Image (spheres, grey):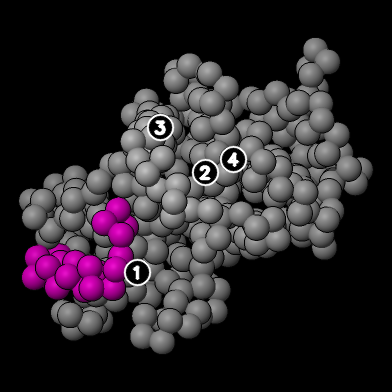
Amino acid sequence: MIQGHVIAERPRAELTQPGMAQQAADWLRDTLGTVARRNPHNRRLGPRRYRLELLAEACDRDTFLLITSWLGSEAVPATTSKQAYADDICLWADVARELGGHDRFFVGAVTPGMIETWTKLQKVQGKAPRTINRRLSVLTALTQYAAWKTKETIASPVTKHDRPKVDPRDETTATPILEVAEFQAVINAATTPRQALVPTLIYTLAGRVTESCTAQLHHLKHHDGQRLLDLRRKGGKGRVWTIPERLGQLIDVATDGRDTGAILVNDDGHPMDRHSVDRLLNRLGRQAGVLPDRDLTPHVLRASRLTHMHDEGRPVEEIQEYADHAAIETTLRYIRRRDSAARKAAHAAAAVAVYDHLVDRFIK
């Protein structure tokens, strides 16, 4: 357990008014948001609760303060990453409780032996190597932050031998792509302007679900005859996007004269979050008959737009800029997969030419 973590106290008389510490705690609580945790034994969803409360229950006091410092810092810049890391820490608290008998999680509660047992169980359950690696990386990142914060030597329980190899070109687990006609079928399945706005906005901006849900009407501006949208992208990066006229008209119809509030709302007028967006897209996907046995997620729309830009002949640097990818290697994954599929189709067709005339007698 980490010792010596200093806790700032305020005089009791000052607690009647919310101070800076309380405002910071409220900000982190709202940033981490809520989640309905799934029972690991019966797989049932529990009640939706604040992640900050779940962390407070799962961790000892010093570790809770350490984790809130970590998640509230620029060590974890993106809101979605902060939320995912909080969920993963709660998962590791469950592991420490079940395999180590620890009622409360602390740095060092998960040992190398527990890691070995857990990774084997994940493989038995068929979890993807990327998912296993991501959760192991969270534990390593927390350990590294704890070592920096406390100035103590703390070894991570995770080694390179625990991490399953990830095939960077594995197409079976890669995000599927909608062809243009399939995307059009999704839009055609919408029955209201509000429903149609969700996939069109995400696709047009190659956006992520969180930034799309947090976009507000007051973020829309007019300048030099153009309509602009101030968007806060992953990592807190501010970007200004030109809204095409047709999309702007759809926004006007879908928002029905409002000038405040979220751009994306459901048909009852309530602001949409990532869960309601997922539900809507999956419903539209089923009605459109696209991606059988796969979910139509916001990331599918984002990946589809970036792939279509490659199909349109856009330079890779332009696609990277539009996607706001920090590394061009991320952008190249979409391009390589698209080009690889085309090459394999061409090679397969060439193979058929070798025996085509010989199987005519079997095929009518």
The residues bearing labels 2 and 4 have C-alpha atoms spaced at a distance of: 6 Å
The amino acid at mark 3 is Ala
- Write down the quadrant of residue 251 in the picture: top right
Mark 2 residue crowding within 10 angstroms, few (<14) / some (14–19) / many (20+): many
Q: Are marks 2 and 4 in contact (CB under 8 Å)?
A: yes
Residue, x 64% and y 37% (percent of image)? 180
Q: Secondary structure at mark 4?
A: loop
Q: Pick out the residue farthest to the bottom.
A: 42
- Label annotation for residue 179: 4
Q: Kindly identify which residue carries mark 2.
A: 177
The answer to whether any part of residue 318 appears in the image is yes
- Write down the quadrant of residue 349 in the picture: top left
Mark 4 residue crowding within 10 angstroms, few (<14) / some (14–19) / many (20+): some
Q: Are marks 2 and 1 in contact (CB under 8 Å)?
A: no
The residues bearing labels 4 and 3 have C-alpha atoms spaced at a distance of: 18 Å
Residue, x 52% and y 43% (percent of image)? 177
The amino acid at mark 1 is Cys
Question: In the rendered structure, which segment of residues is drawn in magenta?
Answer: 108-131
Q: Kindly identify which residue carries mark 1.
A: 90
- The quadrant of the picture occupied by the N terminus is bottom left
- Of mark 3 and mark 2, the one earlier in the sequence is 2
The answer to whether any part of residue 146 appears in the image is no
Q: Kindly identify which residue carries mark 3.
A: 346
- Write down the quadrant of residue 311 in the picture: top right
Of marks 1 and 3, the one in the foreground: 3
The residues bearing labels 4 and 1 have C-alpha atoms spaced at a distance of: 38 Å
Q: Secondary structure at mark 2?
A: loop
Q: Secondary structure at mark 3?
A: helix
- Of mark 1 and mark 3, the one earlier in the sequence is 1
